[in-house]
Amino acid sequence: MNIIEAKNIVYEYPDGTEALKHIDFKVEKGDIVALLGPNGAGKSTLFLHFNGILEPASGEILIDNKRLKYDRKSLLKVRQKIGIVFQNPDDQLFAPTVEEDVAFGPLNIGLSQEEAKKRVEDSLKKVGMEGFEKKPPHHLSGGQKKRIAIAGILAMGPEVMILDEPTSGLDPKGASKILKLLYKLNDEGMTIIISTHDVDLVPIYAKKINVINKGKIIKEGTPHEVFDDVDIIRKANLRLPRIAHLVEILEKEDQFKLADHYPLTIGEARKSILEHIDK
Ligand SMILES: Nc1ncnc2c1ncn2[C@@H]1O[C@H](COP(=O)(O)OP(=O)(O)OP(=O)(O)O)[C@@H](O)[C@H]1O
Ligand SMILES: [Mg+2]
């Protein structure tokens, strides 16, 4: 079943920028999907449609196959179900301290002080930010703010978590910790949608990729289906994962063919190389 579906969405900003041009996009319940695209492609604009922050000029958003409505009550409901971590944490964090910020969502949906406290502790631990409870969010570093923003949405226990560039600004260990966490949450049943232009990270976690460029979805499929279409990837100002690029050069310049598909991750490359040596 599709938990989120965008049908023929058109969106124009007030200054006339046509940010989304007839977008179709769907996510099945339990999926982990990446929206891959260069700067200005329309990723953030599309995401803001999924819980009704933006309303399309034409087309419709379906949540659980029902058309999203834009009255206050419907929006409150959809925002409990679908949590969005904004690209810029400064758009999200506002409370005087980290713990108040993360507790805001849970208290707002009517949970007890005690339950909210538990959720704050739990989510700060999950993002590696325990010990920062009393700090004002505006005194944190960029990467730390990002983690607090993720914790704030996590604490609401949404059914779907949408993360706009969740790893940008994080150090390698922090990024890998967040990705592992998202993978685990997905394993436990949460639907996860991530936007990124990080082509090295995307094949490690995403089961499906949608490529967006200039307001249009130009390709969708498994990581291999998407990255096999090298022309489309390069046309969208993206590139192959580094490891795939190396194998592409070996094949084109040195007539060394490793396997039918370019490996997209270190793990895949390792497997192919070992198989090649065996032969
Ligand atoms: N508030 C706004 N008013 C006018 N135009 C906007 C506004 N926000 C975004 N745009 C334009 O809409 C288009 C899509 O922007 P969007 O922020 O959705 O891209 P993105 O894919 O998220 O890019 P990035 O990778 O840089 O975050 C761009 O051309 C951008 O300039
Ligand atoms: Mg963006």
Image (tube, rainbow, N blue to C red):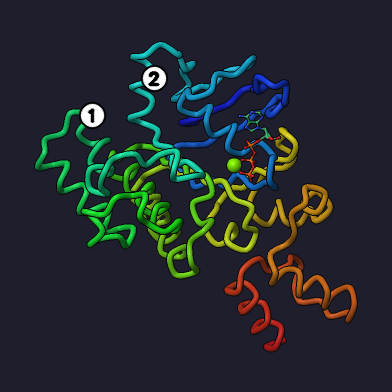
Q: Is residue 205 visible?
A: yes
Give the x, y percent position of residue 174.
Answer: 43, 65
User: Total of numbered circles in the picture?
Assistant: 2
Q: Residue at x 62, y 47 (%)?
A: 209
What residue sits right under mark 2 in the picture?
75
Q: Quadrant of residue 24?
A: top right
State which image quarter holds ligand 1. top right
CA gap between label 1 and label 2 equals 13 Å
Can you identify the residue that label 1 sits on? 109
Q: Residues within 10 Å of mark 1 (few under 14, many from 20)?
A: few
Q: Which amino acid does the dot numbered 1 rest on?
A: Ile
Label placed on residue 10: none
Residue type indicated by callout 2: Leu
Q: Residue furthest front?
A: 139
Residue at 55% of width from left, 51% of height from top?
207
Mark 2 nearby-residue class (10 Å; few <14, some 14–19, many ≥20): some
